[in-house]
Amino acid sequence: MFLKKYISEIWRAVKSLLKGMKLTGYYFTHHKEIITQNYPEVKQPLPERFRGEVVLIHDENNEHACTGCTACELACPNGTIKIITKFDVSAEGKKKKALDTFVYHLELCTMCNLCIEACPTSAIKMAQNFEHSVFNRNDLTKKLNKPGSKIREGVE
Amino acid sequence: MKAVDIIFYCIAIFVLTTGVLAVTTRKIFRSAIWLLFCLMGVAALYFWMNANFIAAIQIAVYVGGIVVLIIFSIFLTQQSGNQMPKPNFLRIIVASITSLIGLGLMLQLFAKQTFKTTNKNFDIDIATLGKQLLSTDANGYALPFEVISILLLAAMVGCIVIAMKPKTQL
Amino acid sequence: MLSLETITNNVHDWLNSHVSNTWATIIEMVIVGLLVIGLFAILGLILVLMERKVSAFMQIRVGPNRVGFKGSLQTLADTLKLVLKEGLTPKGADKFLFNLAPYIVMCAAMLILAPIAFANNFQIWDINIGVLYISSISSISVIGILMAGWASNNKYSLLGAMRSGAQIVSYELSAGFSVLCIVILTGSLKISDIINAQQNGWFIFKGHIPAIISFIIFIIAVTAETNRAPFDLAEAESELTAGFHTEYSGMKFALFFLAEYVNIFVVCAIGAILFFGGWMPLHIGNWHGFNHIMDYIPSSLWFMLKVFGLIFLIMWFRWTFPRLRVDQLLNLEWKYLLPLSLVNLLLMTIVAIMGWYF
């Protein structure tokens, strides 16, 4: 019958609308359900394998393990890394290739991890820092070796 | 001059200006908007006269109904944003002569007619209005009311018939 | 006891004793105008903040929480931003109508405030056709929307304006019918009469079944009339970017935004007056003790509580239901709401004639 169908349609519509309103009403009154976090104050722990930027590992003596072999520069698919080398003169008067500047273009990096895998001495690693925003684009070109740092003894 | 007179002349100037603009502008949408302002000015005159009911009906029927319909039909016709072509000279002449004749007739009527001023309060309550609308007395409006409602019913049935799809198409 | 009524009476007496009657009237008009503008500004700030907080909690978020205490000054900051922005007029737009449209919408919203009673004897204009006046003036705002849509010279704006026009014109019918139900119970269109008739109980209780049905129809129809979700096809940000106000920026956009929220306030105020007794405290029949206790709460507070309750209901709708399609929208009105409200009007008439109400 037409009228019966008409009224039951209205009844079903009202019921489904009330069901939806019940759920949102529940969320409105239960603030503990809130899943967002106040970002700068509360930072969620990042996953272990999260890759944020490339850093050169320095120990407490301001020494790193980079030999300046440019393996990472060759491995990089989009020219993010530029290694500038120099020649150190050792005590015996022997010339030795060493790292002068580790130039890292963060704006080009895709965090693909190929440079870390290519490094023979495990001198670089991926850090978890992700807050990279700066006011000047040039600030994204970074020098990774700290001033005055030198290669650790015994790393070939 | 009292404040009441000043308000009357302000409203009258508004109505006349918008009325003239409505027929002289060459953009059809603007013409509709000027017409709208003209009708609202008339409603303001009714409010000024304390005839609240007729003013509200004026706004509800003309502004809410008729001007919206006009604007809809303007939207649905093509190139409503373009300027209309200038009317030819003969038409302007004919139109101005007709309107001048109309004006002359009106002025003559006004001159003959003597307007009585009344001190009766115009603030009629709704119950009296309703009874007047439905009364069958000498001054009642029952017959026109019913005739108009039958006319509207016929128009509505006609609309439904036109809009209805034939069964075979379904 | 200090109430809004005594304040207005004192101001009126003081003005009349110091200046001539004409000037007193003019000064009172200016004061009323300033109060209305001030009310608009405050309402805009409060309602936008309320909407953002309500939506946030319903969507399991926190919402604005930086500016001021728990984000309480967020809307003030937003307004400052809007004031500083440039008001652009697109190329090819009809400049005059484009700039006029926001003011038309605002003026319509302001005019509807006139017959609304905010507290006991605190009303701008107790016009004898109050309810009819409201429903006729509210049809002006659709003209502003159509004007904005056409003058922007933008296809999205035009589509949004046309949708909104069709929507408002059709939903005005069922809103009008549900208002008529209450008018049948009171036998008067005057707002103060309608409120005074609810002395011994609000109409939603006094008129029981037909009043509840007409309240439901009313709240659906006014949600559609104010262009709010689930009936926000005129704006429909996922289809039409922003509908009729796509091209507006800066303060002109803010005026549209403000008018939307003021319209919500106005329709909720009308709903509160018609169904929940306006400023009338909760009275139950002849329980004089109970009624007397309720009278201690100021009438303006009662009014605001009811209005904000209804506003919350409309916001609840917005953040729960998905948007309707155009054909569904018109189906709902012409196939369900209109027949139902006609039948309900008949039912209410029978109830009123037989005296089956309390």
Image: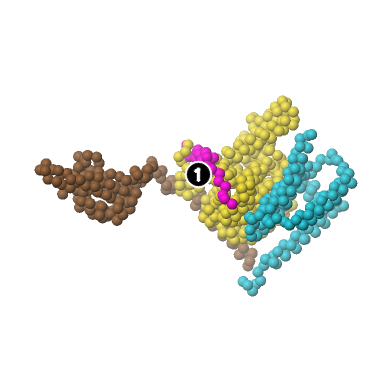
Chain colours: A brown, B cyan, C yellow
The quarter of the rendered structure image containing the N terminus of chain C is top right
Q: Is residue C348 magenta?
A: no
Q: Is residue C90 magenta?
A: yes
Q: Residue furthest left?
A: A92
In this picture, residue C84 sits left or right of residue C9: left
Q: Which residue is mark 1?
A: C53
Q: Amino acid at mark 1?
A: Lys
Q: How many marks?
A: 1
In this picture, residue C51 sits left or right of residue C4: left
- Residue placed most toward the observer, C242 or B13: B13
- Quarter of the image holding residue C111? top right
Give percent across and percent down for residue C188. 73, 46
Figure check: A70 above or below B118: below
Figure check: A50 above or below A7: above
Label 1 environment density (alpha carbons within 10 Å; few <14, some 14–19, many ≥20)? many
Span highlighted in magenta in the image: C69-92
Q: Residue furthest front?
A: B89
Give percent across and percent down for residue C152. 59, 51
- Residue placed most toward the observer, B158 or C310: B158
Figure check: A20 above or below A145: below
